[in-house]
Image (cartoon, rainbow, N blue to C red):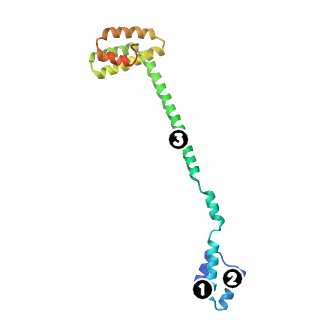
């Protein structure tokens, strides 16, 4: 080992004190340079190697499968809670929108009944679907405004006039408006 390599070797860890360097210098003076070098290398390697307690500390820090599973379960529960809150918020928002729409329907009942008559006159399946939806809206608006008797009376008249349209009546039976 050259003098430069020796100092570089020592600089990697820390400089040796005079007391620590004395055995190595004695070996060098006795002409046992290779032995001094090997002892120095061994000392250096043992100084940079982690101690025998380090693997125990590392093992203590490692997560077990049970810990990982617990974290997964907690993350899933947290996600489900967050999704449930979001879904509840969306349902509330849709409920408010539906309530505002039904208030509009309740204020303009005659206009919606006229629209129902116009759609029935088209005699198409899509128009009948729209009629069904509008009648459900009118029914809910009547319940909301406590004018259920008015709706029932108009609905019975509607059924009397259009009762011979089986495709329309089947759609209305599925909504339970006919009960």
How far is the residue under mark 2 from the one under mark 1? 14 Å
Query: For this rendering, which residue is in front, 169 or 65?
Result: 65
- Helix or strand or loop: what does disc 2 sit on? helix
Check residue 21 in the rendering and tell me which mark sits there, or answer none: 2
Are there few (<14), some (14-19), or many (20+) residues within 10 Å of tag 1?
few
How far is the residue under mark 3 from the one under mark 1? 64 Å
Are there few (<14), some (14-19), or many (20+) residues within 10 Å of tag 3?
few
Query: Please, which residue is most extreme toward the right here?
Result: 19
How far is the residue under mark 3 from the one under mark 2? 62 Å
Nearest to viewer (mark 2 / mark 1): 2
Residue position for label 3: 79
Q: Position of residue 12 (x, y in %)?
A: 61, 75
Check residue 15 in the rendering and tell me which mark sits there, or answer none: none
Q: Give the mark nearest the N terminus, 2 or 1.
A: 1
Check residue 3 in the rendering and tell me which mark sits there, or answer none: 1
Quarter placement of the N terminus: bottom right
- Residue at the spot 42% in from the left edge and 18% down from the top edge: 105
Residue 174, picture quadrant: top left
- Helix or strand or loop: what does disc 3 sit on? helix
């Amino acid at each position: 080992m050259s003098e430069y390599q020796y100092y570089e070797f020592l600089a990697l860890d820390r400089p040796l004190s005079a007391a620590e360097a004395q055995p190595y210098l004695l070996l060098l003076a006795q002409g046992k340079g290779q032995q001094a070098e090997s002892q120095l290398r061994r000392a250096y390697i043992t100084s940079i190697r982690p101690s025998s307690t380090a693997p125990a500390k590392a093992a203590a820090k490692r997560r077990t499968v049970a810990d990982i599973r617990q974290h997964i379960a907690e993350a899933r529960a947290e996600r489900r809670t967050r999704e449930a809150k979001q879904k509840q918020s969306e349902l509330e928002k849709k409920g408010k929108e539906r309530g505002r729409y039904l208030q509009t329907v309740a204020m303009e009942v005659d206009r919606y009944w006229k629209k129902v008559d116009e759609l029935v006159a088209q005699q198409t399946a899509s128009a009948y679907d729209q009629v069904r939806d509008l009648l459900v809206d009118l029914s809910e608006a009547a319940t909301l405004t406590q004018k259920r008797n008015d709706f029932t009376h108009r609905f019975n008249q509607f059924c009397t006039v259009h009762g011979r349209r089986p495709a329309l009546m089947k759609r209305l039976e599925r909504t339970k408006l006919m009960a």
